[in-house]
Structures are given as structure tokens and as C-alpha cells.
Image (spheres, rainbow, N blue to C red):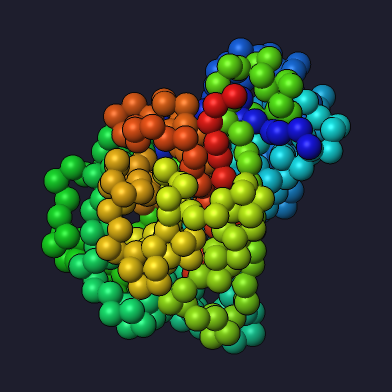
Amino acid sequence: MEKVGIVGYNQVKLYSDANYGRYEMIFEAVRGAIDMAGLKKKDISTVVSCTNDYYDGRTISNCFTVEVGGGYMADESKVEMDGAHGVLYGLMRILSGNHKLAVVWGGSMASCFPYHSARLFETDPTWERPLAYVNDITSAGFQMRAYMEKFGVSAEDIAKVAVKNRRNAAKNPLALAEAQNTNITVKDVLESDVYADPVTELMVAQPCDGVAALLLAPEKQALKITDNPVWITGVGYSQEQYYLGDRNLFECNSMELAGKTAFESAGIKDPRSEIDVAELFEAYAHEELIFTEALGLAKKGEGASVNSEINGEISINPSGGAIGGNPPCATGLIRIIEAAKQLRGEANGYQVKNAKRAIASGQIGMCAQNNIVFILEGGN
């Protein structure tokens, strides 16, 4: 089967409250990705957008974004999930043989809607939603507490993840300014406001404004466009139970199953020794440790012992990860773009040495109910 390559990408800088409109952001992201590949709008054959009707406050939320997203006179469709899921949709469209260039873009402006309130629609409408005691914030507290108690992990261990990612974000010019902090300490994280005990504010991936886009092309076309494509060699996705009480929150079965599928399709036997860099969508700091273990990059309960710094044992979220900025519907897509940057040697200021193979993930749902994993490789 012909390979599919990433041949262009672009991300606008993330803002807590952007001073320009969403449509301008979409145009900037898509136009920049096309320009990077040296292509024209007429070269686009299909566009996949990633938006959410609840976040936008209207149905068919992509209907006003078709033109600015490159979809005018082209095949256009929407994925109401994370941008990483949109990449899978674009990948399948390329593999169908019907399209030669797919644009995938995703993003939103969290400053314009009550993000956490909108996510109440993920809960059970009869028992949980009317009281709002169970929501994406309190469920994160359940998840972190379950992980700590199961494996004897301390809050300090989890705070170190937030420190690492915020320091990494300071090296990334596109990261959210509020997330960039070279001087942050574990004490700062632990003493920040409590979100849902034991989760504190600085452990949270802050929702923000932003849009990102990438281009996919089949192998022959990709090699005509660029001499340095990034190949998608494996993908896997999985979803687990809806009710939190039916899941062991100290682990993530959906990430584990998604990873196994992706590794198998990419021919990876030992992820810890074969993966050079990982960009993981961690909505909260403790999720990075849970995902690290689920993907076999560490043993269960030992994620905190892995040196995940830039150029460490395995570099995890050198860009700052989602803690460096979490624009709903774009965060997983940005993880794929950041992984591609590493493989192309374009992550200026936070480049991992000799990065040849990377993993990137996206998620949706409370406590990472649904996960999708991509294996990316550089070189021809």
C-alpha cells in the first residue's frame, strides 16, 4: 500500500484571548500550510475540518468556515472530535485513492464560550448533568487521586511534569504566553489554586484560542512536493466505557489499546527503545505519566522515574504539550505537527537530537475516554 506523508503544516500562535477573529485564524493556518508546501489553493482536493457544535453554539459549525478553510469548490467534511481524529479521516481519504492533497485543520476560540460548562453535555443527562458534581474538572481529580493511591505516586512527582512542560513551552514561540515559565518550581505548582483536589491550576492544560492545519499526500505526490516528508507509518484508536465508575482511572486502557494497534501497524516491538520523541495530549499533568505507562514507555506506576526532558531518556512533550496551550479541537493536531517538526529538524529551541521516529496522540472525553495514536517517521 502506498504511504501517506505530511507535506506541510502551520499553527497560529496560541492566545488566552486573541485580538483577531476565528476566520482570520483559520485562513492564516491553512494558507500557511499550503505556502509551506509551495502549493496553490487549486491543488486541494479535500478538506477535513475539526470543530464542535457545542463549543460554537450552533449546529453545522463548519458551515461558515468552508471558504477560509480551503474548501471552496473542493470536497469538504467535518469531524466533531479532536484534530488528531481529523488526521485519521484525511488519511483514509488519501488511501481511498480519490484524493491527492488533503487539508486537515482544527481549532476554536475558547475565550468565546464557557468551555467547562459545554463539557457538561458529556455527562449522563439524568443523574450527573443536573447536579454538575461530575464534570471534566472533578473527574480529573478522581483520576489523579486514583493514580496516586494505586501506585504510591506523590503530588510532587506530578507537579514535576507541569514544571517540565511549562519550561519547555517557554522555548516554543507558538505556545500560550501564560503557560511559558522558565522559573516555575514544584512549590509554585503545588501551591497554585486547587481545581479539584489534588489537581491544582498549574497542572491543567488551559483552554485557549488557536487553529492549526496540515497537508497530507500519497507517497508519489508527497515526494514531488517535498524532499523531506514525514510518513504516517502507524495509527490506532480506542474508546472505553462511558461511565467513570466502570473504568480503572489509575490507568488508560484506551491509550494502551490504541498504542498497541499503532505499534503493530508500524512494526514496533519495543516502544521504549524505538521511539525518540513523544508528543502526548495531556489535559492534566498526571495524564502524561498515565499515558507514558500505557504506551509501554515505562512500567506501570514508574512513569515519573523516566527522564522525559528534551534529549532525556525519551523526550516527552518537548514543545510544552497541551499544558503549553490547549485550543479545543486543535490540541491533538498540534501534537502531530510538533512531532513532524522534530522529525524534520525544525523545532528550533527545543529540538531533540537525532529524532527519527515519533509518537503523537489526541484525546476526547472525560479522563481521556477516547485516544488516538500516530507513529511518524522521517526521511525518504
Where the C terminus falls, by quadrant?
top right
Where the N terminus falls, by quadrant?
top right
Q: Is residue 380 left or right of residue 271?
A: right
Q: Residue at x 55, y 71 (%)?
A: 253
Q: Taking the image as drawn, is residue 57 in sight?
A: no
Would you place residue 56 above or below residue 319 in this image?
below
Please state which of residues 371 and 25 is positioned toward the viewer in this rendering.
Answer: 371
Q: Residue at x 62, y 72 (%)?
A: 240
Q: Residue at x 60, y 17 (%)?
A: 226
Q: Is residue 56 left or right of residue 156?
A: right
Please state which of residues 218 and 213 is positioned toward the viewer in this rendering.
Answer: 218
Would you place residue 285 above or below residue 222 in this image?
below
Q: Quadrant of residue 41?
A: top right
Q: Residue 283, percent across and down?
A: 43, 59
Please state which of residues 231 and 369 is positioned toward the viewer in this rendering.
Answer: 231
Q: Residue 228, percent across and down?
A: 55, 21
- Give the total number of marks visible in the rendering: 0
Q: Quadrant of residue 174?
A: top left
Q: Taking the image as drawn, is residue 338 in sight?
A: yes
Q: Residue 294, percent across and down?
A: 48, 65
Q: Residue at x 24, y 71 (%)?
A: 155
Q: Residue 351, percent across and down?
A: 34, 32
Q: Is residue 234 left or right of residue 113?
A: right
